[in-house]
Image (cartoon, rainbow, N blue to C red):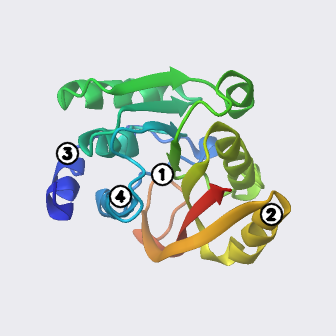
Amino acid sequence: MKLKELESCLQQVDGFEEPKILLEQYPTSPHIAACMLYTIHNTFDDIEGKLIADLGCGCGVLSIGAAMLEAGLCVGFDIDKDALDVARTNTEEFEISNIDLVQSDLSALEVAYAQKFDTVIMNPPFGTKHNQGIDMKFLKTALTLATVVYSLHKSSTRDHIQKRAKDWGVKMELVAELRYDLPASYKFHKKKSVDIHVDFLRFSKS
């Protein structure tokens, strides 16, 4: 499947109807999702035939894209039932059978799913004032589930993440620097959209 074709399919994935500010629910754009997945698939061969976890899967765009690139099985985890309902509808509309959706919070995953996956792909919350440090909680949990983790993080946190990765004995690679066009999703947003500089990172355990 070509990159353009993948992006075009992902444009048909429905997003959040009423995003929840406390969960930092923002959509992963079809363009960014397609670029991430295409790179993971073609450069690193970490999707096809693999067991994949999508943490904080939201409406399922990364899971659906991974399934289209022939993941063995993709399991989307989210704490929010409403988001999973949208994700379930999306997978049904695409008639995709190699996706499971599980409602769970992070703390339960480390016990139930330790080292059960080949690859984790995620776009975690960036950790705004309500949720400081949530991005690192996602990352730490992801690294208990699989040997390879792909994640998006604010570029401004790169040095901090690099230091933590080193403390954990994990190799971090900067795959790409992206501009995340964040659409106005909440009442307090004054601008139509905001550009955030985001790192697409790969973490691997030796």
Inspect the image, locate mark 3, and give the three-letter code of the amino acid beneath it: Gln
Give above or below for 105 relative to 203.
above
As measured in the structure, the alpha-carbon distance from the residue carrying label 1 to the one carrying label 3 is 16 Å
Mark 4, residue position: 29
Considering the image in quadrants, where does the N terminus appear?
bottom left
**Residue at disc 3, secondary structure:** loop
Distance Cα–Cα, label 2 vs label 1: 25 Å
- Residue closer to the observer: 104 or 100: 100
| Residue placed under numbered mark 3 in the picture | 12
Residue 143 position, x and y percent, is 68, 46
- Secondary structure beneath disc 4? loop
Please tell me which of labels 3 and 2 falls first in the chain: 3
Q: Which badge, 4 or 3, is on the more N-terminal residue?
A: 3
The residue carrying mark 1 is 26
Comes first in the chain, label 2 or label 1: 1
Q: Residue 169 location, x and y as percent?
A: 79, 59
Residue 115 falls in which quadrant of the image? top right
To which quarter of the image does residue 16 belong? top left
Q: Which residue is mark 2?
A: 164
Can residue 196 be seen? Answer: yes
Q: Is residue 111 above or below residue 154?
A: above
Whether label 3 touches label 2, CB < 8 Å: no
Q: Are marks 4 and 2 in contact (CB under 8 Å)?
A: no
Q: Secondary structure at mark 2?
A: helix
